[in-house]
Structure formats: structure tokens, C-alpha cells
Image (spheres, helix red, strand yellow):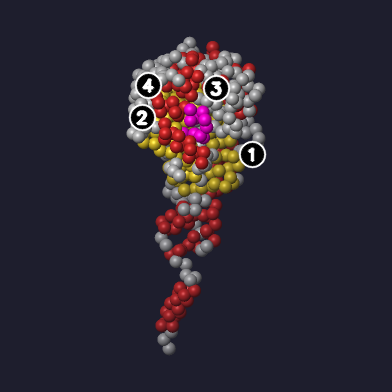
Amino acid sequence: MDHAGDEEAAPNSKRAKLAVTGSEDHLSALPDDVLIHILLKLRDTAFAARTSILSRRWRRMWTLLPEIHFSDASDPRRIRPALAANEAPAILHLAAVAQDASPYSVAAWLQTVAPRLSGDLIFRNIIRSSSTSEERGGFELPCFQNATSIRLSLGFLGLTMPASGVFARLVELSLDHVWIYSPDRLADVISSQRCPALQRLAIRDARCIGNVAIHSGSLQQMELRNLKGFTKLTIHSESLLQMELSDLRNHQQLTVAAPSLEELTLSSCLLGGHGLSLLVSSISAPQLLVLKWKKNTWHPKYFELGEMVHLHCLDIDVFLQYGTDDFMDDTDFLMDDDIGFLMDDIIMYNTDTLMLLQRFKVIHKLNLRVDYLPCMRVNEYLMEDITRLPDITFLSIVITAHAHSFGACLFHVLRMCTGVRKLALDTPGHFDEACPSDCPCGQPSNWKSEELMLDCLQEAEISNLRGTKHELAFMERLFSWATVLKQMTVTFDESITESRDIKEFCQKLLSFSRPEVCMGFFVYRHSKKILYVPVD
């Protein structure tokens, strides 16, 4: 009897049965590259490793992945075995989150991955201790010759940069929450010779004792934020285009030479008060287009600011509408957050703002912020200290009025820039009660009667209105001043609902307007900005 046909029919019958019951493993029959693509979509190496139990076909598939992900704040000791098991030709991406990692455990797996990484490295160390900035020991970073991006948030572990080696392909370096050992090594690594392709550098929440001198011919973007202990900071780069320096603490000397720099942000770097005479700063950026000046003091005796003839936009800090030169003694009525703001930011003294403004004669756009104290107990009018503004075409002004009238303030500012073509007014902040009837916020009252010719103003954007009587009074005057106005948009605060009061407010604005002015009103509904038409 011929059993060959029966033997051949048996497996066919079995496959047919599996197909009918839906048990046939079509997935395992796919090519390796397709299975690898599926596992990469998981973005979790530990979960990918569990697929080994599916079948013999899957047993080693996870080890071929060119990406490694540990995203669940796992034990950092799990990372090194995963790297040792990995059989991919190169590791293109490694992202790991650990909790309370020791310097030794981090150094161990970094040494393992350094020669194999040919892409991005992202590591975050989460610290459970309440004293998050205390020193916890450190390690030396190995040289990553083929890495393109390194982003480390170390939970204030100490970091020493390697003494030798070239990061030949590194484009981005980001260091967060770190104690920097041997700052001279950091400067050496960032230099053009050892990071010839570096374009983006960010160092945030870092501690260091010593001087740092950065010299680079490739950097384009730099962010240094909340650095403590950097006594002397020097930055020289002919390629740098954008730089942000904020919260630089305890430094005594800042020197920046960046001939190609286009945008510079300085925030809480140059603080007055105790030790000001020790602080010397010099910035040379002749091609600068945008200068953002936040919470700094400025005095030509201590700060050398080079010529900026191409400056297009100046974003300047707070100017107090009312107060006294010793207003810092009158803060017992403020909330804790307000007190901290005033105590930390001595820039509130208007003199420094004025001195910086006087450096510039012509600017396309001026961003200005004016603050009112919540209580007008200190009520010396300070706006008259501003006697001149640069010639500008676009004025963007933020007024934190705390329910006070801001008509006098805006009248004073606008009559010094009558050539402005566009006005953007923002009135943020939340308040529960209107200011008292005897409040001096409307003084001086000449803004209510004096004429002002804004015969270039064509466009106005008003944001965060609440429909108050103070706002209505100013808007009526603005329409009378802006004789060639073509377009106005009014956006109400998110807390304002579509009510009869708002409809009446909009209708009054329309009555102040002229037929040739295109008016648009916007409100928020479910956090989405929508057009509002005030019709019956």
C-alpha cells in the first residue's frame, strides 16, 4: 500500500485545520526586518524581550533591535545586560530613565554603549530625595565618537568630561541637573577641535566651581540656565546665531564675543545690589537682531554693550507704573509670590530700564511690560521718568494692571511713539474686585481730555479684555486718537463668557469705531478661540 500520499496529506490537513481555527502563526513567518520594525514600535526593550516566549522564531529577535528603550524608571543595573545581549550592528538610539542611579552603575553601561552608539543618547536619573541638588559622587563620561546627540539629566551626579577623544559626529549636547567637575575639561570638549560638528549646546541647573571658557566655530544655538558657581564665563563663537543666558548665579565676569549672533536672551544674569562692583560684563554682537532683556540691571560702568546697529526687536523688562524708590519696604500687603518676585528681581527699579532704552534710537519692534502693584498704597507716579522712546513701528505692550485704570500709562507711552503702525496690547492677570473709587490709578487725568494724533496706526490687537469700565474708557480714547485705523481685533480673557454684558461692551466699541475699521471679536469656548458676533 502506498502511504506516501497519506503522509503528504497529513501535514496539509493539519495546516488546513490550523487555518480554519485561526491558530496558524502567520506573524512568525514574516521576514526579520518586518519583525524588528514591529518590535521597535513598542519603544520598550523589556517588553520586547518578553516576546521571546512566543516561539523559537522570536527568541532572539529583540536582541537585533538598533534601539534600546527603558522608560519606566527601572533599576539602572538592567541596562548593561540589555546592551551586552544586543547583537545589532550599531545602536542608533538609547533612551533610559532610572531612579536613584549610582555613579558606578551609570558609568558601567555608558562605557559599554559608547563604542557602539551611532545616534542619540537620552538618559534621565530621577532622585527621590528632598535635597535634590546635593552632590552624590560622580563619574567620567566616555568619548562617544559616533553619537549625534547626547542628552543627560543626572539628578546632580557629578560629571567629568573625558581628557581625550573626539566627538566627531556630535551635533547636540544637553546637560541637566549636574555637578560639573573640572570645568576646564568641559570647555576643552566643547571646543571645535574635539566637537567639530557641535551645533546645539544646553547646560541647565548645573553646579560648578571655577571658570568656563567656550570657544567654538560650529555652535549655532546655546542655552545656559540656572548655573551656580561659574565665576568667570567666556563665550567666543563666530558661528553662534542664538543664545539664551538665564539665572547665572555668583558669576563675577561675563564676556561674550559672537560676531554672527542674531538673537540674545539675558534673564536674571546681571543683578544689582550687593557685590555689583565685582561684576563686569561685556557683550559684543554687532549683527544682533533681537535682544530680550529680562530681570537684569544695567549700568554702563559695569556693563559694556557693543554697537547693535541692526537691532530689529527689543524685548525689555518690567517698568513700574506707581511706586517709590524704596518700594521694596512696602510689600507687606502682597501675596508671597509677589513678594518673592519683587525681592528677587531688583530690575524693578525703573532707572535701569530707562538707561538701556536710551541706547537705541530706532527699532522696528519694542516689547514693553508695565506692572501695577496690586495695592496703590505707594502711589508716586513713575511713568513721567520715561521721557523718550526709540522710533518704532510696532509697539507690543503687556500691562499687568490688577483691575486698575491703565489709560494714563498708555497715553504717556503712545505720545512718545506717534509713528507706530501696529499696536498689540495685552492685559493679563486675574482679579476678583475692581479697584476702590478713590484709587489714584487714573492720574494724571489728562489722557481723558488731551488730543493725541496717532496718524500712522493702522492695526490694533487687544487681548485679555474683561469688559470693565476702565477698559471701555481707554478704548473710546484710542478710537479718537487713531484716525487712520483700518483693523482691530479684540480677544476677551478665557474667563469671560458670552453674556449680555459682553455683547453690550462690544456694541459700545462698535459705536466708537468708524465704518472703514474692520472689527473682530473673539472669545474662548472650551479653551478654543472662536469668533464672536454681538448680535441680538
- Disc 1 to disc 3, how far (Cα)? 48 Å
Name the one closer to the observer, 34 or 304.
Answer: 304
> Which one is earlier in the sequence, the residue at label 1 or at label 4?
1
Q: Is residue 344 left or right of residue 416?
A: right
For badge 3, the amino acid type reads Cys
Q: Is residue 306 left or right of residue 254?
A: left
* Residue drawn 52% across the image and 30% down it: 469
Residue on which the image places disc 2: 485
- Disc 1 to disc 4, how far (Cα)? 61 Å
Name the one closer to the observer, 237 or 89.
Answer: 237
- Disc 1 to disc 2, how far (Cα)? 58 Å
Give the secondary structure at mark 4.
Answer: loop
> Which one is earlier in the sequence, the residue at label 3 or at label 4?
3
For badge 4, the amino acid type reads Met
Marking on residue 453: 4
Magenta stretch holds residue 397? no
- Disc 2 to disc 3, how far (Cα)? 27 Å
Disc 1 versus disc 3: nearer the observer: 3
The image position of residue 223, as x and y in percent, is 47, 29
Give the secondary structure at mark 2.
Answer: loop
Direction bottom: furthest residue: 1
